[in-house]
Image (tube, helix red, strand yellow):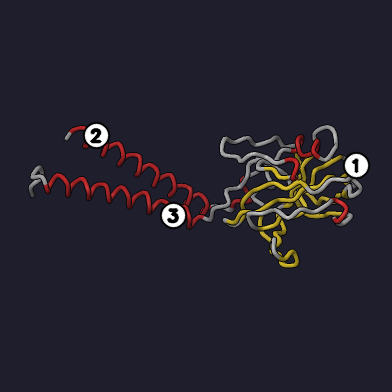
Amino acid sequence: MPVLSVLSAISLVILFMLGSWQYDRYSEKMERPEAVQTEEPVLAIEIDLDRDLPGSVQQVYGFADSEPIWRRYAPGRVKDTGDRVLVMIEATGGAEPVAAPLSTLQATVSYEGTLTRKERNESAFNAQDNPDQDQWYALSPTLMWTNLGLEGTPLVAEPVIMTVRNAADLNQSRLTPNPYAYSKPIDPLPPERHFGYALTWWGMALGLIGVYVALHRARGRLKF
């Protein structure tokens, strides 16, 4: 059965390559902390929020600690320079966002974070944005700024450590590293997950070998 043998050989190569790729990711994450993947400076940022605008916070879907979150952004000005900025305040956990008018926010936000210009990270897998509900599935500074009735493209401020609030009870919260603080998002998967994926791919390869040998032996093509 030459066709079966060729397809089995190709599948084996692919499965072993996938397993090796996941093991390399596991080794990479175990050798160095994720926070050193970027050269962007971490700054002490203090921002006055524009609470007088009639809109609401802009919410962007994402993941942290293997959980879906909604990151909350608001317009403001950097205290030191007066630059207009779209600042991430906090996030809420869960699949559903929690709306918040700008007028309900605190006056000032301060944290250790990054202050950069970012472009929309387009992906074919992103869901459809819903600007009317202030919901986005990719960070889109220009579009989010326009949705607030403002012009131009703002700087984006992101905390290195973000607050994630429980969507059902906003008084409950936790602190966690922000995987979106840098231009290149940090992979949120823990290293152990990659090791598990590697074992899965290699296990499927061994299973394919077992099925291949059993099939040919049952039909008398292999004798030991």
Alpha carbon distance from label 2 to label 1: 65 Å
Vertical order, 65 against 21 (above or below): below
Identity of the residue drawn at 75% across and 67% down: 171
* Three-letter residue code for mark 3: Phe
Q: Say what secondary structure mark 1 lies in.
A: loop
Alpha carbon distance from label 3 to label 2: 29 Å
Q: Say what secondary structure mark 3 lies in.
A: helix
* Three-letter residue code for mark 1: Gly
Alpha carbon distance from label 1 to label 3: 47 Å
133 with respect to 64 (left or right): right
Residue position for label 2: 6
Q: Nearer the viewer, residue 90 or 43?
A: 90
The disc placed on residue 195 is 3
> Which callout, 3 or 2, points to the residue nearer the camera?
2
Quadrant location, the N terminus: top left
Instruction: State the image coordinates of residue 128 (x, y, percent, origin top left).
Output: 64, 39
Q: Mark 1 or mark 3, which has the lower sequence index? A: 1
Instruction: State the image coordinates of residue 27 (x, y, percent, origin top left).
Output: 47, 51
Q: Mark 2 or mark 1, which has the lower sequence index? A: 2
Q: How many marks?
A: 3
* Three-letter residue code for mark 2: Val
Q: Nearer the viewer, residue 46 or 169?
A: 169
Instruction: State the image coordinates of residue 111 (x, y, percent, origin top left).
Output: 79, 55
Identity of the residue drawn at 74% across and 52% down: 159
Q: Mark 3 or mark 2, which has the lower sequence index? A: 2
Residue position for label 1: 82
